[in-house]
Amino acid sequence: MSGQRHIIVGGGVAAASAAATLRAGGLDGEIHIVSDDVALPYERPPLSKEFLDPDSDGAPTPVKPAEWYDEEQITVHLQTRATVLDPAAHVVELSGGERLGYDKLLLATGVRARTLPQVQSDRILTLRSLDDALAVRARLAEAERVAVLGGGFIGCEAAAAAVKLGKRVTLLERTDTLMQAVLGPVLGGVMTDVHRAAGVHVLTGVVVQNVEVSPTTLVVRTNRGVIEADLVLVGAGSLPNVELAQEAGLRIDRGVLTDEHSRTSAPDVYAAGDVAAALHPHYGEHIRVEHHDSAVRHGASAARNMLGLDDPFLETHWFWSDQYDHSIQQVGRARPDDEVVVRGSLDDLSFSAFSLRDGRITRVISLNRPKDVLAVRRLLFTEYAVTAAQLRDEATQLNRLAPRKPPPRAEA
């Protein structure tokens, strides 16, 4: 592929992983990363955790050192947006007016945080990018009262970080428990209790009506009263950055639609990471996953397909979140009618909740039991059978459920 130019639009881990895979796979043409971020690709998970501590060094964790991009001859356009994509002409236009032709292009534009409509203040912040995290870190250092709007991943992680710094934290969530959309009401209730035990004032079933800004305080008005705060952090979910693809005429449905090989509806245009809704061969539907590790592997898979290799993306639906001293992990996808089987103790904060259908595990959510998640991750798309009684039994070794291959026959 000498003389070719491959362009990656986006500056996250999917983009860095794709660039590295293209070079390692033998592409000796040009590679361009177009990123509207201020820094080279970095790890986002720490931004809502230890990065917020004023005693940390305040520097992002890079995916690759700066010299790596020079050594691999990868051109990175920072603080630059791709404004127009013309798939027919194989050209992308950048915010500085430059037009770049391409042989293959990868969309890894990620997602952006939802914001509060019609309310603007440097004390009402979101947490997604490095700039966001720096702003939150600075405000958090001087704030005493913090209101977090939304009990999902970002909201819970940021609340945990803030209360550990001695802040008075109020966490407001619309549903009956924290993280209910992901964990369900029972396990979400466990995490709600964890946050309350740590000192977070958790209010559930709360609808935020508006936030009023005054020179001295922020007033969060809800259907259940008023909360005063020095800092409001909005953790109300995210939106995929599909605008460039949409304006270029690509197929969009809750993300940029791709086949299992990361190909979009436009020739030579691929998509990976948080913005991509990829067709999953096992589930038979398009799935969009917002998670660091999935983005890394998706970027690498897309790059291999850009190189002409046959590499369907078969990633299982997996995520993790660290809150206080606890690790929450999930792998797989469940249906509402799946049987839920719990191994371990909810009270002791050490358990795995398995979703079971027709003798197979469809999903597991674990608190402080990473080995269970690793075992199920290996099982998901293999042939085996298990009962609810076996799953409840601690003596059942999950890694032995899959049938073992018979040893090769010795030559006569």
Image (spheres, rainbow, N blue to C red):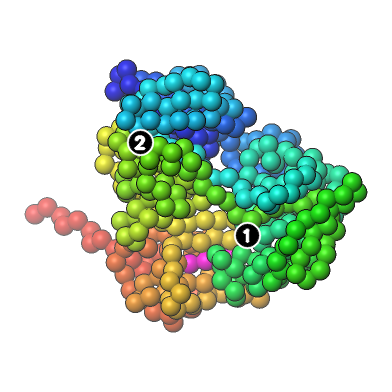
Stretch of the chain drawn in magenta: 364-368
Considering the whole magenta stretch, tell me its main secondary structure: strand
Residue neighbourhood size for the residue with mark 1, other residues' Cα within 10 Å, grouped as few (<14), some (14–19), many (≥20): some
Relative to 301, is 6 above or below? above
Q: Is residue 292 visible?
A: no
The quarter of the rendered structure image containing the C terminus is bottom left
Amino acid, disc 2: Val
Pick whichever of labels 1 and 2 is earlier in the sequence. Answer: 1
Query: Which secondary structure lies at badge 2?
Result: strand
Residue shown at the point (15%, 55%) measured from the top left = 410
Relative to 238, is 330 above or below? below
The quadrant in which residue 4 appears is top left
Residue 269's tag is 2
Q: Magenta stretch containing residue 327, yes or no?
A: no
Residue shown at the point (58%, 45%) measured from the top left = 112
Amino acid, disc 1: Gly
Task: Give the residue pinned by disc 1.
Answer: 152
Seen from the viewer's position, the closer of residues 2 and 139 is 139
* Residue 349 picture location, percent across and down: 64, 70
The quadrant in which residue 225 appears is bottom right
* Residue 245 picture location, percent across and down: 43, 40
Query: In the displayed structure, does residue 173 sit left or right of residue 84?
Result: right
Residue shown at the point (57%, 31%) measured from the top left = 36
Residue 129's tag is none
